[in-house]
Amino acid sequence: MKQIILLLLLCSLCGCKVFRQNSETVKSFNFCYKEKHTGIDTLIGVSGFYYKESDERNGVLTKEGFNTIYPVYMFFKNGFFIYNPSIELYTTHSNHENVTGNVGLYVIHGDTIKAQFVEPLYNMSWNKGEVWFKIIDSNTLEALYFKYYDSVTAKEVIDFNKTNNRKSFYKFKPLEVIPNTDKSWIMKEKWFWCNEEDYYRFKKSIKGK
């Protein structure tokens, strides 16, 4: 009996911890989905992913290099962002409609892209992360700063890049089939949306699908 009570108490404590983490993560995620075209495709390549140049072998990206040592990033016209999608995106030729990985949003300020993401739902840590990029050209991004938990500040980016001599460049690789962002779990979360009316309209549009 004591063992059962102890088990229930442990589950209760873990549940409280997860709930608290979720609440803190939602509050710290200060971007919101507007369901609008961001114009990013006029600045960089989309309908594909960005990967670290050093993941190539003899100039060709290998399956082993995808999403292993270095991260992979995807940007969508509607503001959606994916950090480290599933390797199946690159290694198979099936319809990649399901959205996997860490998901979130980006905003554009001049030549800088600021992106926030959250880990997959029900992950025990379930934290927020943020990464800034500089647009080098239409097919190349430089990762300026990466941070978990709190939002990135301009001072952090400036200070880091003053002393960092190792630049991280990411190249664009197009894909024939890209994930359908409407199928992501985060689209069903009201806190993710800027406008409640848009959220309820979306929920109604996917009902029964």
Image (cartoon, grey):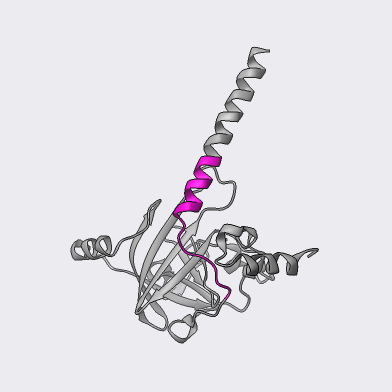
| Residue 134 image offset from top left, x and y in percent | 34, 74
Quadrant assignment, res 193: bottom right
Quadrant assignment, res 129: bottom left
Outermost residue on the top side: it is 1
Q: Can residue 183 be seen in this view?
A: yes
- Looking at the image, how many numbered discs can be counted on the residues? 0
Outermost residue on the bottom side: it is 42
Q: Looking at the picture, does residue 110 appear above or below residue 86?
A: below
Q: Which residue is drawn at 52% across and 36% down?
A: 17
Q: Is residue 58 visible?
A: no
Outermost residue on the right side: it is 208
| Nearer the observer, 171 or 157 | 157
Q: In this view, does 200 lie to the left or right of 28?
A: right
Q: In this view, does 181 lie to the left or right of 111?
A: right
Q: Which residue is drawn at 46% across and 69% down?
A: 106
Residue 167 among those drawn in magenta = no
Residue 26 among those drawn in magenta = yes
| Residue 30 image offset from top left, x and y in percent | 45, 60
Magenta region, residue range: 19-35
Q: In which quarter of the image is the C terminus?
A: bottom right
| Residue 110 image offset from top left, x and y in percent | 35, 79
Q: Which residue is drawn at 37% across and 57% down?
A: 151
Q: In which quarter of the image is the N terminus?
A: top right
Q: In this view, does 207 lie to the left or right of 39?
A: right
| Residue 141 image offset from top left, x and y in percent | 38, 75
Q: In this view, does 24 lie to the left or right of 200?
A: left
